[in-house]
Amino acid sequence: MKSPHFQRVLTSLLLLPLLGWAIYSGDPVLSFGITAVAGFGLMEFYAMFWPGKEKLPWKIGAMPLALGMVWAPLSWSGTALVCLALLAVATGFLVTHDRDKYPDAFLDSQILLFGLLYLPFILRLFRTISAPEIALVLLTTFAADTGAYYAGSLLGGPKIWPSVSPKKTWAGSLGGLGASVLVCSAVGLALGTANWTRFVMLGAGLNIVAQLGDFFESAIKRWRGIKDSGKILPGHGGILDRIDSLLFTLPLYCGIAALFPFFA
């Protein structure tokens, strides 16, 4: 039987060409890729709260909303999309407002809305930035995960937050930080136009939120008593296990880049 580490590396090597093709091709290939990742990730997210066929109407109703979020014209503001999603979810709650029949209806509506904002709404941001920016965000985020994994495995040491993620160490955290800064600076110097010091600070900032994203999903899984979000990616677990950091780094990059452009 192949080791989890071997499976992890093999899965990454198989997915990287597809990822590169989607970035190089742009729309509509990129949007189809975003749709696939958002759809599988959303199913995993809802399955953590509603396993099996539980709350199936809520899950089915979320899919067209997710599709609309990804494919809505870029001229639509994010505020408009959030408001429309909120109105749709509020309508769902209204339909199931009978407390005797649906005692958890309002909680379910919150889970539904959070999933939509956490996955398709955030991943849609890839459509708003250029190919070099996508490459920078992805490579810096992957560097954070990879650097932390190998530094933590090799050096071990004190844990950061064992009640949330018992395997993560301070050595791994620092290793991921160094890898993120190095990769972000290298991509920035090769493709960007901003001063190198901005890319160093950007790499550090992206790494910090990448770790928060990892901890966030770990906290949800521990709260729900789940080891992995899914099994679709051998060696990694589920889609969410692979993109949890990215769901934090992408919006941070877009926010910072709106104030301090890194690419011409």
Image: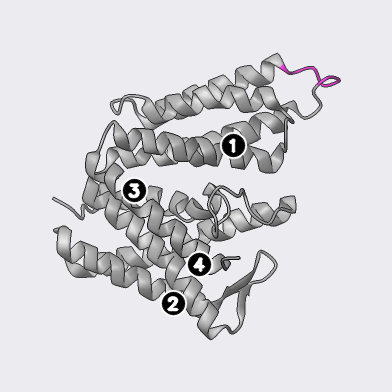
Residue 138 in view in this figure: yes
Q: Is residue 64 above or below residue 153?
A: above
Q: What's the CA distance linking mark 2 and mark 1?
A: 32 Å
Would you name the residue on which mark 3 appears? 19
Label 1 sits on a secondary structure element that is helix
At a point 43% along the width and 34% down the height, the residue shown is: 35
- The amino acid type found where label 2 is placed reads Gly
230 vs 131, nearest the viewer: 230
Q: Quadrant of residue 163?
A: bottom right
In magenta segment, residue 169? no
- The amino acid type found where label 1 is placed reads Met
Of tags 4 and 2, which is closer to the observer?
4
Label 3 sits on a secondary structure element that is helix
**Whole-percent x and y of residue 247?**
46, 49
Would you name the residue on which mark 4 appears? 6
Q: Earlier in the sequence, mark 2 or mark 1?
A: 1
**Residue 117 left/right relative to 107:** left
**Whole-percent x and y of residue 125?**
35, 40
**Residue 11 left/right relative to 26:** right
**Residue 111 left/right relative to 87:** right
**Whole-percent x and y of residue 33?**
38, 38
**Whole-percent x and y of residue 31?**
34, 34
Would you name the residue on which mark 2 appears? 175
Q: Is residue 12 above or below residue 34?
A: below
Q: Earlier in the sequence, mark 4 or mark 1?
A: 4
Q: Which residues are magenta?
A: 96-101
| Quadrant location, the N terminus | bottom right
Would you name the residue on which mark 1 appears? 43
